[in-house]
């Protein structure tokens, strides 16, 4: 594997050993946000949506927004990192923003620093999993529905504990729930349920993550004549569904093969993956 690099607030460093400074508030207090961004042909996709969500999250966390935090700025930084790391095809980027060092629970400043990591991804396009994954509910810890619920904050313990629970139960993933028992998402993805050719996905006011791929899939589906409804999803909805799939920025779609004794097909999932690849192929061609 080629040597990978990180960008620590403007400084390019080899991705080995210590690259964060002592006192980093994201490390100490989870006082930060992040975005996971997919690369195709070595370039970031959906970057405008990612940066918009990042800015909204920074506002919710009362962080000061630098004027240079634009899509164009981060696009150049990511492409530079991809070039140094010799990633020309598929890739995965994690863009972090942390409140600057100083203070304990009470910060000394609302200024921020950024940190960018990059890793290669084997496929340069989205590929649907051949075998459907197995899921079940995670109820030991409920996700809180508050002003931070729609953002990717660095308080991810509900997802970590859910992922450990899935491993211990020999499942591929688990579905995170809120205090009302509604299903929000999986440990790393948004949730879609298909019944009679119609897509249903939890609405943001229920407390799910405002995923960038979620938004893209909703828009693509509507543009191609597939009805989409944002609504509360309860466990009984899974039992009557024809299909269930998960979405995130890196994988695109992952279809669910089973929930307990219920089995699902993947017809709509296959169609949407094809639409995604066509969509991004056209966008990349238009930029050349």
Image (tube, helix red, strand yellow):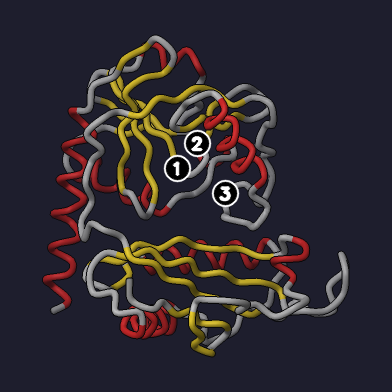
Task: Give the quarter of the image for residue 90.
Answer: bottom left
SS for dot 3: loop
Q: Kindly identify the residue that appears in the image at 57 percent across and 55 percent down.
A: 152
- The reply to whether the C-beta atoms of the residues labelled 2 and 1 are less than 8 Å apart is yes
Q: Kindly identify the residue that appears in the image at 49 percent across and 22 percent down.
A: 136
Give the Cα separation between the discs numbered 2 and 1. 6 Å
Give the Cα separation between the discs numbered 1 and 3. 12 Å
Q: Is residue 165 left or right of residue 128?
A: right
Which is more foreground, mark 1 or mark 3? 1
Q: Which mark identifies residue 65?
A: none
Please provide percent x and percent y for residue 28: 77, 65
SS for dot 2: strand
Q: Kindly identify the residue that appears in the image at 63 percent across and 67 percent down.
A: 58
**Which of disc 3 and disc 1 is earlier in sequence?**
3
Q: Is residue 253 left or right of residue 61?
A: left
Closer to the camera in the image, 188 or 194? 188
> What residue does disc 1 label?
189
User: How many C-alpha atoms fall within 10 Å of the one at disc 2: few (<14), some, or many (≥20)?
Assistant: many
**Which of disc 3 and disc 2 is earlier in sequence?**
3
Q: Which mark identifies residue 150?
A: 3
SS for dot 1: loop
Q: Quadrant of the N terminus?
A: bottom left
Q: Kindly identify the residue that appears in the image at 35 percent across and 79 percent down.
A: 85
């Amino acid at each position: 594997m080629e040597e990978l690099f990180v960008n620590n607030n403007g400084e390019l460093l080899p991705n080995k050993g210590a690259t964060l400074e002592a006192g980093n508030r994201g490390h100490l207090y989870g006082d930060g946000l992040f975005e996971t961004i997919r690369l195709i042909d070595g370039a970031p996709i959906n970057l405008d949506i990612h940066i918009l969500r990042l800015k909204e999250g920074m506002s919710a966390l009362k962080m000061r927004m630098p004027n240079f935090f634009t899509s164009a700025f981060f696009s150049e930084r990511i492409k530079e990192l991809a070039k140094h790391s010799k990633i020309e095809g598929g890739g995965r980027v994690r863009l972090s923003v942390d409140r600057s060092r100083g203070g304990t629970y009470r910060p000394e400043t609302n200024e921020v620093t950024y940190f960018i990591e990059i890793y290669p991804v084997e496929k340069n396009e989205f590929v649907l999993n051949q075998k459907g994954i197995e899921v079940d509910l995670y109820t030991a810890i409920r996700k809180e529905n508050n002003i931070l619920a729609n953002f990717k904050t660095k308080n991810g313990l509900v997802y970590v504990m859910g992922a450990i629970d899935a491993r211990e139960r020999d499942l591929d993933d688990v579905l995170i729930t809120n205090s009302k028992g509604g299903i929000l998402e999986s440990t790393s993805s948004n949730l879609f349920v298909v019944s009679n050719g119609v897509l249903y996905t939890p609405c943001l006011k229920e407390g799910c993550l405002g995923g960038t791929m979620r938004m893209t899939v909703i828009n693509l589906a509507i543009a191609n004549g597939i009805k989409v409804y944002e609504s509360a999803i309860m466990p009984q909805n899974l039992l009557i569904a024809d299909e269930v799939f998960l979405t995130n920025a890196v994988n695109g779609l992952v279809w669910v093969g089973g929930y307990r004794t219920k089995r699902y097909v993947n017809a709509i999932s296959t169609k949407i993956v094809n639409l995604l690849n066509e969509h991004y192929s056209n966008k990349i061609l238009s930029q050349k």
